[in-house]
Amino acid sequence: MIDKLGKTKVILVEDDAEDIEFFMECLEDLPYEAEVTTYRNGQEFVDGMIANRTNLPDLVFLDLNMPVKNGVQALKELRALPDFKNIPVVAIYSTSISEKDHAETFLHGADAFISKPNDYKDLKRLIRQIFEIDWKNRNTDKKNFIITPL
């Protein structure tokens, strides 16, 4: 569970400005204090992680369908670098509901997969569920989560 009293470092990798705004509004409406850094594509994200390797995030929301470098490519590249192999969590945030996409993202190191809802309440509920998972103390049998709106 993310500490509601401490500031959580969140990265959102998303190319759609409206989706960024929607995410930020939902997050602001939750009882978590978060410092959010955004990147517009997978290449910017990987470059940003390498440049800031001493300031790792607590949580990453990574879109799959982006220009320049997609989410899966960025995830593969990130997980191949020793400094980032065990970052606390990478949650995949995408419009995709394909089981193939779920499997591929988990194969390359994702910890969770959520499908982007269009409803404010649903997105807020999904973000809350992600924040309530005990990422730091999860066991070594690393569970993968597919989180969907109710």
Image (cartoon, helix red, strand yellow):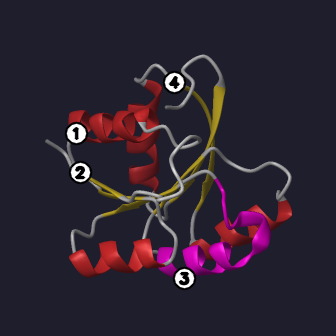
Q: Mark 4 near mark 2, Cβ–Cβ under 8 Å?
A: no
The residue under label 2 is 117
Label 2 Cα crowd, 10 Å radius (few <14 / some 14-19 / many 20+): some
**In the shown orientation, is residue 95 left or right of residue 46?**
left
Q: Which amino acid, mark 4?
A: Tyr
Q: Is residue 100 left or right of residue 87?
A: left
Task: Identify the residue under disc 4.
Answer: 32
- Magenta residues, dominant SS class: helix
Amino acid type at image mark 2? Pro
Circle 1 residues within 10 Å: few <14, some 14–19, many ≥20: some
Quadrant of the drawing holding the C terminus: top left
- The quadrant holding residue 107 is bottom left
Mark toward the start of the polypeptide (4 vs 3): 4
What separation in Å lies between label 4 and label 2 (alpha carbons)? 20 Å
Magenta residues (range): 68-87
Which residue is pictured at 80% across the width and 67% down the height? 50
Which label sits in the foreground, 4 or 2?
4
Of the residues shown, which amino acid type is indicated by label 1? Asp
**Tally of numbered tags:** 4
Label 1 or label 2, whichever comes before in sequence order: 2
Tell me how far mark 3 sits from mark 1, CA to CA. Answer: 28 Å
Residue contact between numbered discs 3 and 1, judged by CB atoms under 8 Å? no
Look at label 3 and name its amino acid.
Gln
Q: CA distance from mark 1 to mark 4?
A: 17 Å
Which mark is first along the chain, 2 or 3? 3
Give the image quarter of residue 8. top right
List the residue tagged with mark 1: 122
Q: Is residue 82 magenta?
A: yes
Residue matched to label 3: 73
Residue shown at the point (65%, 80%) measured from the top left: 77
Q: Secondary structure at mark 1?
A: helix
